[in-house]
Amino acid sequence: QVQLVESGGGLVQAGGSLVLSCAASGDILSINAMGWYRQAPGKQRELVAVITHGGGTKYADSVKGRFTISRDNAKNTVYLQMNSLKPEDTAVYYCNVDHLYHSDYSASDYWGQGTQVTVSS
């Protein structure tokens, strides 16, 4: 069993900052990629940022230069530093773990429960 616990969402004014974190716990041998997705009302879920075990990153064009993804492999935790937030960043943010390897070498993908980020203008 694996659990993902997200934290750090909330309400912030435009131009402000927030930090999201997502900690994975349970039967974990290693994790390939960890990332953040978001879904705004009436829209499809979209990739925000992803980071590989080795530290390679990819960002959505809309957040490049404003958001920074990082991870602590020892703690199985991924972070999303969000700066210069805009009202259009308002969404539910979901943590994703891609190819989490268990002690029996099986692999699974997991999603967090989601955390609301609201940016007021």
Image (spheres, grey):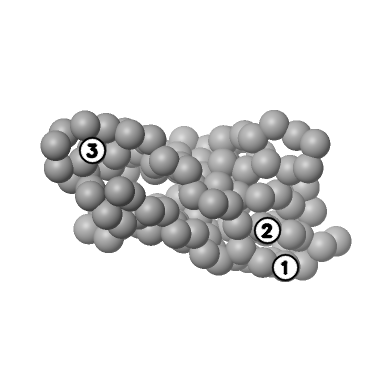
Say which quarter of the image contains residue 103.
top left
Of all residues shown, which one is farthest toward the right? Answer: 121
Is residue 68 visible to us here?
A: no
Is residue 19 visible to us here?
A: yes
SS at circle 1: strand
Question: Residue 12, labelled with which disc?
Answer: 1
Quadrant occupied by the C terminus: bottom right
Asked if the residue under mark 3 is in contact with the one under mark 1, i.e. CB atoms within 8 Å, the reply is no
Residue 104, position in %: x, y? 14, 37
Type of the residue with mark 1: Val
Of all residues shown, which one is farthest toward the left? Answer: 104
Crowd band around label 1 with a 10 angstrom C-alpha radius: few (<14), some (14–19), many (20+): some
SS at circle 2: strand
Type of the residue with mark 3: Tyr
Is 13 placed left or right of 24 in the picture? right
Write down the residue under mark 2.
Answer: 117
Find the distance from the CA under tag 1 to the CA under tag 2: 8 Å
Q: Which of 20 and 14 is in front in this view?
A: 20
At 30% from the left and 48% from the top, the residue drawn is: 1
Crowd band around label 3 with a 10 angstrom C-alpha radius: few (<14), some (14–19), many (20+): some
Question: Is tag 1's residue or tag 2's residue first in the polypeptide sequence?
Answer: 1
Find the distance from the CA under tag 2 to the CA under tag 3: 30 Å
SS at circle 3: strand
Residue 40, position in %: x, y? 73, 43
Q: Which of marks 1 and 3 is in front?
A: 3
At 77% from the left and 47% from the top, the residue drawn is: 88
Write down the residue under mark 3.
Answer: 101
Residue 61, position in %: x, y? 62, 35
At 68% from the left and 58% from the top, the residue drawn is: 117
At 80% from the left and 36% from the top, the residue drawn is: 42
Asked if the residue under mark 2 is in contact with the one under mark 1, i.e. CB atoms within 8 Å, the reply is yes
